[in-house]
Amino acid sequence: MSRRRGLAALLGPPLLWLVVAYLGALAVIFATAFWTTDPFTNQVVRTFTLENFADLFSPTYLRIIGRTLLIAALVTVLCIAIAVPLAFFMARVAPRRLRGLLLAAVLVPLWASYLVKAYAWRTMVQPDGVLDNAFGATPGYGFGALVLTLTYLWLPYMVLPVYAAFERLPETHLEASADLGARPLATFRRVVVPALLPAIAAGSIFTFSLSLGDYIAVQIVGGKLQVLGTAVLQNITLDLPFAAALGTVSALIMVLYLLAVRRTGALDNL
Amino acid sequence: MRLGRGAKIALTAFATVVFTFIYVPILVVTLNSFNSDRTFGWPPPGFTTQWWNLALQAQGPRDALLVSVKAGLGATAIALVLGTLLALALSRFDFFGKHAISILVVLPIALPGIVTGIALQSVIQNLLTPVFGIGAGLFTIIVGHATFCIVLIFNNVTARLRRMGGSLEQASADLGARPFTTFRRVTFPLLRSSLLAGALLAFALSFDEIVVTTFTAGPDSQTLPIWIFNNLFRPNQAPVVNVVAVVLIIVSIVPVWLAQRLAGADAAESRI
Amino acid sequence: MRSSKIKGFGAVAAVAVLALAGCGSSADSGSTGASAAPGGMQVPNLKAMDKLGTPEGEVNVLAWPGYVEDGSNDPAVDWVSDFEKSSGCKVNVKTFGTSDEAVQLMRTGQYDTVSASGDATLRLIAAGDVEPVNTSLVTNYPDIFESLKMKPWNSVNGVPYGIPHGRGANLLMYRTDLVKPAPDSWGAVFDKAGAQAGKVTAYDSPIYIADAALYLMATKPELGIKDPYALDETQLAAAVDLLKAQKANISEYWSDYLKEVQAFKSGSSTIGTTWQVIANVAKGEKAPVEAVLPKEGATGWSDTWMVGAKSQHKTCAYKFIDHIVSPKVNAQIAEYFGEAPANKKACAETADKNHCTVFHAEDEEYFSKVRYWNTPISTCLDGRTDVKCTDYAAWTKAWTEIRNS
């Protein structure tokens, strides 16, 4: 059997699946973004137009896109800020026999439905709710509550790869650095961070993309906030082409993000 | 890295705060499953076990659980086959377009679910139903889930293959084994634990997926997250949903424990 | 894939060309023509069933949550299992959260029947997603309140498109301890909303624009609004301005009722639109709230069971609808969901003998103040012919603009 035939046999089925079932579907929806709808029945009419994309550049939608990017970025930064020290503690500081348990403790909440957890956050931030009782203050429904809730929901997706990276980091590298006279902070910056970057980038693909596309948590804790996800949702039934145009924007943002993080080796760390 | 005592204490304190942050909402859910207020008003006005009784009798969540398990198993099985094939192709061969494929395989999980969802829905409505007579249902849910699960298997297997190198397979081939025999006798046994780890992750992801599922589910296929979504907003049903969530957390200890065992055997690379 | 364009105008007809283009999704294969009847609306030529056949074995139902309960959520709440046994039709239920979602799901052609609100019905009819119904095949039809039959949202050009299910009004709810004096006007959520700044709630749908229009009808007669679902450009703009001003005082928009009950209990919302059932649940959980029908009247809903044009299970669909509007079942649903039943005889069947009084089922005077949800179309529903009215798509754009402002 020639190598070429072997490659074709291996590559054929998965590529056929991804290209036909996935790229094909995406292509259809992106093409839809160039069509219009009938004003009354809201059905798609195949008349070419660029209007959907022109509408995207109105101040209203630019604001929504900007706001959504800000939320996704904030959530990602918060997740990194929490996950790195936590994963370090779990992998390097906690007693060895506790490590598995701690990892399980991060994972178990993933199995409680994400909707249920989002609703629990309603109770957390409401007036006289848990946060209010504990700290005497609450952000209330809106931007702050949404960022907090999304950070909560996606945190495990950041902790996992970072924890794995810390586990992989050989103790000898750290010791060598210390032996060479580096203080812990310098060791962290010179040795740990480079080893961590691909893992952080991998985690950020999840936190960023999940925040970018969320439309459910925002309806539960977001008050009157409008984000890209809710804008897509509102338009799906009434103006599918415009929803598709909004979807194309978020897809484009993610593709750019992927290309940017690919250089760190993040894609192997998912 | 030698940490000072202060740094260790600070890290421990930080981790304690984070774990509190993770578990307080779970505690809220658990308390609400005993909250006598139908709309789980806070603070709970009283204690009741009626939601637990109701949940134990209800057929709805059990049926939905069954659909979820079927969908998860189906999607995982497809992802296992396709992900492994792709990992073997990309690790063992060099060819034009390799990098494009490595992006393509990540895409389904990286693009927002709502985009994948409406894309698949329009294919179901415009192609599958009118041309092939396949409506939205369990089959379309499995197709959707399998698509974003491929990458999980792919990455686990790729990592393992990279570590294994090709020498064992080379030896097998040199000894006259045909490619399939080599795969069955050499490669597969070596991949087994990473396949299991990837499969668990894929199953978990499929099990809690709601966005893509919303757009691919039909009238007779309600997964557990969809059931939760449909019932969470109704005062008479919402407390029952809290019970289901608590049960899920408790039951989930099994797969997480299983994953731990696997990871323990192979801590360095498993991503569970 | 076909695309059948229907041209021509009705008598009243400043209607834009209704293009029934199908992404294969909606236009029925048998219908390429249109009936240009004098009502002004263009509808595909579809025929109602003449007689029932043999039950097909199953029926796929699209319903508001709480309308179709088969005991799977609570064994005590079940009005489907007996029907399944007696009719031989297995019932598969899918619930939806908003009228838009209902329209979209119905468009997949996978559902045989739908409980559609007035802001969905005309869209379904115009797109050929649903067909006329033969009311003589529904044995309980004669017992349905006359005031609900053959209305603009459930019939077109004198042809019935569905069977009424139940009705209710969108009321004004407020916290009795925090809102004083007790409001009796929608002004409390519009012009005087500042008194409850950051605590006002509103329904999250384009159809809420009608609530603003209803208020303007009473307070700004110079705008000349006669029907809150028939707004010309100027009138719509006035309603949009009112809603944009209101937004500054909004805490959150609601579409699910658990969220609203919680918000009123915790006090994060103190005043806003509600349904009777929400007010009842909130009171049941001891929230100090009251719901009133303000002096300007209110918008409301009257839901309709419709039959899918592409249905493969029409006999089962008719049998199911007949079952749902039968006195006993209609009473059960009305009580479980919290609305006024459509069947006159249902009032004698409710477990709580006061139910029909609480929900004003037989109180025609009460409902005379209710403007039921209807789908705005470009032919003005109030009969004006000198202007074009704004259609639902324009309302949606306006609503997105309000939400994003």
Image: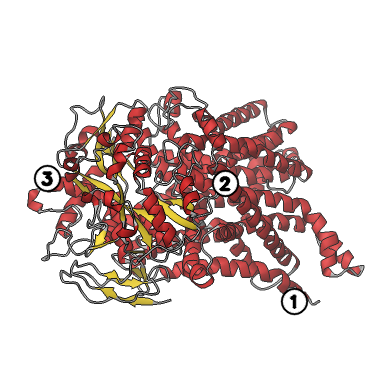
Q: Is residue C33 above or below residue C301?
A: below
Q: Nearer the viewer, residue C125 or A205?
A: C125
Which chain's residue wears label 1? A
Q: Give the residue number, with chain letter if any, for mark 1.
A: A4
Kindly indicate the quadrant of the structure image that contains residue A262.
bottom right
Q: Amino acid at mark 3?
A: Ala
The answer to whether tags 1 and 3 share a subunit is no
Q: Give the residue number, with chain letter if any, for mark 2.
A: B63
Q: Nearer the viewer, residue C355 or A234?
A: C355
Q: Amino acid at mark 2?
A: Asp
Kindly indicate the quadrant of the structure image that contains residue A158.
top right
Q: How far apart are labels 1 and 3 at the CA level?
A: 78 Å
At 18% from the left and 43% from the top, the residue drawn is: C364
Q: How far apart are labels 2 and 1 at the CA level?
A: 47 Å
Q: Which mark is residue C218?
A: 3
A93 left or right of C48 in image: right
Q: Nearer the viewer, residue C391 or A141?
A: C391
From where the camera sits, is residue A80 visible? no
Q: Position of residue A29 (x, y in %)?
A: 46, 66
Q: How many marks?
A: 3
